[in-house]
Amino acid sequence: MALTPLDIHNKEFTRSFRGYDEDEVNEFLDQVIKDYEMTIREKKDLQEKVEQLNEKLGHFTNIESTLNNSILIAQETAEELKGNAQKESKLIIKEAEKNADRIVNEALTKSRRIEMDIEELKKQAKVFRTRLKMLVEAQLDVIDANDWEGLFEEESDEETEDNVSEVPDYAESRA
């Protein structure tokens, strides 16, 4: 059990025949009491200061812990965002590649269809040309036939002139 200033102040010593000078002892005890009180006050002040510093330390430790957690969360979030961005970019690239393949395939299909249409038109043009040639040749054969000469000989020149005036002019009617 520690001594208090009051314990020192109330301490009574037994008297002996050749003992110490009572006033000197009392003065010394008064000085010890003052020093002891001052030491107790300093100790109390230091304890309060230690408590304040411990509170501040606890506060700063809490802040440090919170900051560390925040940094970890930020790093995890950044990694997650980075991963999501990479996944999204891969999806966009895959989608673009699919669209490009689809466009190329559609273009190839369309070009094949156009080539087939061109070939069909060429065939039709050849058939038309052949038919037209045959028609023209047939008409030329009809014109070259000797049957026409007999028709011209039987008719008289007068009737021919009358008939020519009655025949409508197709060039005028088309215009």
Image: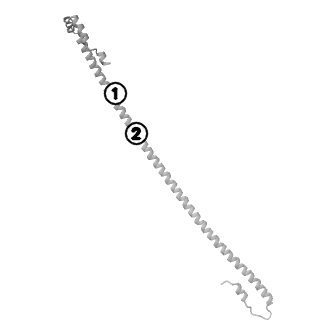
Where in the figure is residue 25, as x and y percent of width and height? 78, 87
- Residue 38 is labelled as none
Under mark 2, the amino acid is Asp
Disc on the earlier residue, 1 or 2: 2
Where in the figure is residue 89, as x and y percent of width and height? 47, 47
Under mark 1, the amino acid is Ile
Relative to 17, say whether 48 is above or below. above
Quadrant position of residue 1 = bottom right
Mark 1 vs mark 2: in front: 1
- Residue 101 is labelled as 2
Callout 2: helix, strand or loop? helix
Callout 1: helix, strand or loop? helix
Per the image, the residue denoted by label 1 is: 118
Residue beneath the point at 53% across and 56% down: 75
Q: Quadrant of the C terminus?
A: top left
Quadrant position of residue 128 = top left
